[in-house]
Amino acid sequence: MSQKTIRNDFVSEKTALITGASSGIGKSFAEILAKEGYNLILVARRKHKLDALAETLADQFSVETKVIVADLSIIEQITNVVEIIKSLDHINVLVNNAGFGLSSSFAKGDYERQLAMVNVHVVASYMLSRAAVPIMLRKNEGLIINVSSMSGLMIKFGDVTYTTTKAFLITFSESLQEELRNTNINIHALCPGMTYSEFHDTKELEEFDKSTVPKRLWMSSAEVVKKSLKAARKGKVVYVPGFLNHLSLFLSNMFIVRRLSQWIISRNEKKT
C-alpha cells in the first residue's frame, strides 16, 4: 500500500481528522475534504475499509493520509486519539462523526450498549474537541463539526439514549461557539435526517424498514456533507440540511403531532 504518513511539521498545508470515516457521512467528509486538498487522519474501527479509503484518496488527490483504528466506545482508545491530536502542529478541521443507533427502550435496552453510545457520541466528541481547540487557538483558525441528528432537536418518546446524546452535541456546539465568538474558529452541529449510509445496516437496527420512509425524505451522504461544509463556513452553528427536513422537524414538534406520535408509540408498546 502506497499510504503516506502525516508529518507533524505541516504549517501551510491543511489537515482534517474525521471519526467514523469508513462509511456514510464520515467517508463523504473524507472524500470532499481530500478533493479540497486536506491531508487526512481517518479514524474508525474497520481497518480494511480505512486502509482502502486512505489509499484511494492519497492516490486520487495527492494528499497525505493516516489511519487510526479505534473503537471510540472505549475510553483508552479515545485517549489514544487525543494524544495523536495533541502531537500535531496544527489541525484545521475536526469532524466528530462516529456514532450508531439503538432501537430498544431505555429501561429494557442493553445497558452496556447504551453506555457505549454515551462514550461514542458524547465523551469522544468532548475529549477530541478539548484536544483540538487549544491547537486551533494558537493558529486562530479551525472548524469543528459535531454530527448530531434531527432527533436531537425533537421532543418525542423513544430512543432516549440516542436522542439525548445527539441533543448534547447541539448544546455543546452552541456553547463552545459562544465561548469562541471572538476567534476565527467555527463550531458546527450538523443535524441530518434520513441519510443513505450504513447507519441502518447494523444488528441494533435490523428491524428498521427503510421503505417506510418516503424517498423524498432521504438524502445522500455526499449531499449532506456538501451542504454542511457550506453552512459551517458561513458560520451556521446548528444546521438541518434540506427543506423537507426543516418541514418535518417543524411538524414533529407541533403539540398535536407530538401527542399523536406519543399515542401511537404507547399503543405499540402495549401490544408487545
Image (cartoon, helix red, strand yellow):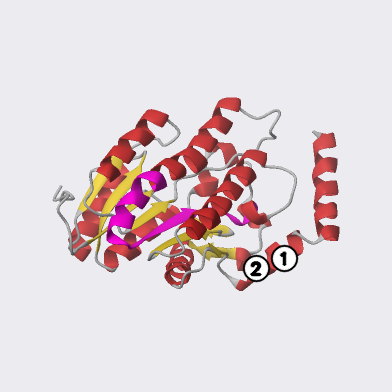
Query: Does residue 251 sit above or below 270 in this rendering?
Result: below
x and y percent of residue 240 in the render?
58, 65
Q: Nearer the viewer, residue 199 or 128?
A: 128
Q: Is residue 206 magenta?
A: no
* Picture residue at 30% right of the left edge, 46% below the top: 50
Report the disc number at residue 246. Answer: 2
Three-letter residue code for mark 2 = His
Q: Are marks 2 and 1 in contact (CB under 8 Å)?
A: yes
Three-letter residue code for mark 1 = Phe
* Residue 16 showing in the rendered view: no
x and y percent of residue 143 in the render?
38, 60
* C-alpha distance separating marks 2 and 1: 6 Å
Left or right of 69: which side holds 13? left
* Residue 113 showing in the rendered view: yes
Secondary structure beneath label 2: helix
Left or right of 50: which side holds 157? right
In the rendered image, the quadrant that contains the C terminus is top right
Report the disc number at residue 250. Answer: 1
The residue range painted magenta reads 129-151
Q: Nearer the viewer, residue 78 or 244?
A: 78
* Picture residue at 45% right of the left edge, 73% below the top: 234
